[in-house]
Amino acid sequence: MRLTDIKELYRKRENFIGTEVTVGGWVRSNRDSKSFGFLVINDGTFFETLQVVYGDGLSNFEEICKINVGAALIVRGTIVETPNAKQPFEMQAAEVTVEGTSAADYPLQKKRHTFEYLRTISHLRPRTNTFQAVFRVRSLIAYAIHSFFMERGFVYVHTPLITGSDCEGAGEMFQVTTLDLNNIPKNGDGEVDFAQDFFGKPTNLTVSGQLNVETYAFAFKNVYTFGPTFRAENSNTTRHAAEFWMIEPEMAFADLKDDMMLAEAMLKYIIRYVLENAPEEMAFFNQFVDKGLLERLKHVVDSDFAHVTYTEAVEILEKHNDAFDYKVSWGCDLQTEHERYLTEEVFKRPVFVTDYPKEIKAFYMKLNEDGRTVAAMDCLVPGIGEIIGGSQREDKLELLEQRMEELNLPKEDYGFYLDLRRYGSVRHAGFGLGFERCVMYLTGMSNIRDVVPFPRTVKNCEL
Amino acid sequence: MRLTDIKELYRKRENFIGTEVTVGGWVRSNRDSKSFGFLVINDGTFFETLQVVYGDGLSNFEEICKINVGAALIVRGTIVETPNAKQPFEMQAAEVTVEGTSAADYPLQKKRHTFEYLRTISHLRPRTNTFQAVFRVRSLIAYAIHSFFMERGFVYVHTPLITGSDCEGAGEMFQVTTLDLNNIPKNGDGEVDFAQDFFGKPTNLTVSGQLNVETYAFAFKNVYTFGPTFRAENSNTTRHAAEFWMIEPEMAFADLKDDMMLAEAMLKYIIRYVLENAPEEMAFFNQFVDKGLLERLKHVVDSDFAHVTYTEAVEILEKHNDAFDYKVSWGCDLQTEHERYLTEEVFKRPVFVTDYPKEIKAFYMKLNEDGRTVAAMDCLVPGIGEIIGGSQREDKLELLEQRMEELNLPKEDYGFYLDLRRYGSVRHAGFGLGFERCVMYLTGMSNIRDVVPFPRTVKNCEL
């Protein structure tokens, strides 16, 4: 069908004033008086709506007056300027065709609904202002991330979702199986006979693509993965979902400093991209969801991120232990309250905390010369705390094996990973960015369920 | 680290002749004579390699002579033109630093390995010419797809992977569970007590995001999903993987004709993008993997795709039944041999076959006025057969319910899908493109295991 997007009407307004166009969209509101009426139409291409004026000259005037919210229409008419109205222009309808009616029990009548209620109708909520904005911005962020890495020559690698190993052993995992759960086959020892399973062994859903993507960094130098990851954690919070997307770049011939430069450049790129490409949505969030959002994001773009070691950060935080629920001392993991204090109160801008105690970080992180800390970094941002976690990786075979022995990790499960240290090992580094956390950060939305189209959480897997 | 990419040396050669640069990369070969030697280095940024000449003036000359294939080096030196050599320029080394040695048993010595052998070392194979080319092109195709849709204002939707419904009921599904398989809890009726499972009910890995993404087309008009999908089919062929990626666009206010225009434009866009951005890789495939590839792809870009109805196609094919293993008659599904005959012999270009019998297509496809065919389309391309399958969707509530009843689909499982037909239903259409099949088509690679970084197939889930 030859339809004009409402986005085009707004962005190239001067081309359309005085001309006739045809628009297809859904009714947001309809009010009529005796001889004319006003339809407000959204077509999904743009945050703003089109007002359509219709008069009793139309043959189906009576029908139009009765059109319910949510109905789909095709309207043909002339675009005219409306210098004294709220909206810059409107359409004077020559023809209004009903594409699909909307039943009287349409759940999205013109009133405010709670986010909680809207979660129960995840197939309809993208038709509301807030979720139009959230999911358009989500899409733009995804594209900004791809563009950022492709412009820099990174190779996008699809790491596997079904995996036979548990990677960094982080969190509970979902099992994947084709065995009949009502009748699990057992072997001679009375244990599950995985030989009969699809892959011939136990398999899980991945919690991270990092170890896999490292193998590709050793072939392409700069790579990234961007795909779904899973955690079967039984935690019902506003920040945890069982299924979420993650971005994990990995660079060969790179150290922790390069890693931080990449993370800073990426965050600034994403924010700039969204501010440029979704100004209406961002203004909406700033006004209705999170006052101060725009100022905070612009401040991030304009700041040089600060740097502080974990040891220095602990010294700073210890002086304010009175203010914290969890008291800080060297060796402890930093909590969100500490992270936010550092970035919001101490540095007043994003800050990288580096060189954490090896005990609280993953086995693959590069041991520093002090023998007690590793070349890890967390990027903390105002309003949220940690948004990115990364590290330089241990590239020395002996040190990596030693660390794995300390942690009782079975070497035979990591043969491919150790091979990387046998054949042309290089210093390398990477990080992980939780995509949903990034979307929450950029939109100001405070519940992860409201930035995932169809969220999966404990006891919840609808649609 | 400040390193120069080999890609830059090639693409901006004139800037570098006579200047000193530092490059990091992996050794592809090393041959030395008495007083000098030649290293061939690949750094993963470019398909071509850099030749490095080193002489006995270097303090570590002896060490360099012994460097094994696969080692990681950092080389500093001057770029000089080599008008009489195979390669356009080389580096005269001032310094060669060993970043990481390569053990003597490095599996990728300078000889040809079979694809089959390379599948057993999926963590190392991207370091070979063929797989460097495959996985760089895979990355470029992914980006071309995102760019194509974003340029047209489509919204990218992440449809869920864990699902409580089986969508179109296609193929066998993987179950997802956190129940202890050694000790499955049972309820009073002796059946699996899914109330104790993570989501409180049986869940599977998705086979398609289409039904979910349709709900977003009714909010944003034009949307697409691009993510992993899963089939637990026990078929050990060169074309099936248990985990693969799929692209599924969906357009509201669009019919089958719009759908075919989109599919044709997308395929041409992807091919053009890859030919432009990976000319070296594509020339390599054409020479070593699939002679005739470039000609075939260029022909696709230059052709107007043909159109034929299923009924017409069957009439054409019936005349050649002698040549087919499976004989054709109205009502049968077309096999690859028929599809290839149509596109390669009859039309000699890509062709859309439309309006298939409703019995061989999915329940959601729009019934044509004849009452026996549906508004479906398959896009067939020379060399492969079907590459895209799509349809206009049934947008009339009564007709959709009627078809679901015929097929005994439980309406209560599709409440959200039926809601779309209750509240502002519009004509709409979409299609599915198997990403791996697309990569195979553009590279000429003939086994799906060779276009997936870490393939998952029956009894195979390594790394």
Image (cartoon, coloured by chain):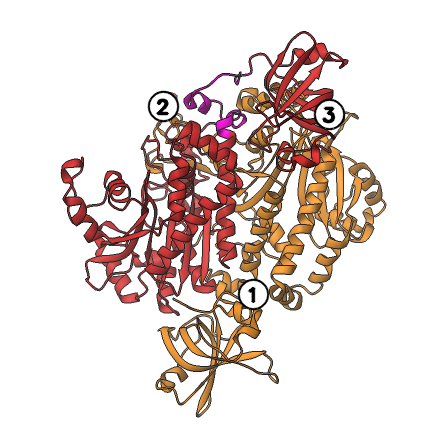
Chain colours: A orange, B red
Stretch of the chain drawn in magenta: B106-131
In the displayed structure, does residue A336 sit left or right of residue B339? right
Q: Earlier in the sequence, mark 1 or mark 2?
A: 1
Q: Are labels 1 and 2 on one chain?
A: yes
What residue occupies the far front of the structure in this picture? B84
Of badges 3 and 2, nearer the viewer stands 3
- Estimate the x, y position of residue A124 in percent, counting from the top left: 45, 64
Task: Measure how far apart labels 1 and 2 are at the Cα level.
Answer: 54 Å
Q: State the image quarter where residue A250 is shown.
A: top right
Q: Secondary structure at mark 3?
A: strand
The residue nearer to you, when weighing A338 against B319, is: B319
Mark 3 and mark 2, same subunit?
no
To which residue does mark 3 refer? B76
- Residue A64 visible within the image: yes
Badge 1 amino acid: Thr
Q: Please tell me which residue lies in front, B387 or A460.
A: B387
Q: Is residue B234 left or right of residue A131?
A: left
Q: What is the chain identity of the residue bearing mark 1?
A: A
Q: Secondary structure at mark 2?
A: loop
Q: Which residue is mark 1?
A: A130
Task: Establish if A295 lies above or below B8.
Answer: below
Please tell me the numbered disc located at residue A187: 2
- Characterize the local packing of mark 3: few (<14), some (14-19) or many (20 or more) Cα atoms within 10 angstroms: many
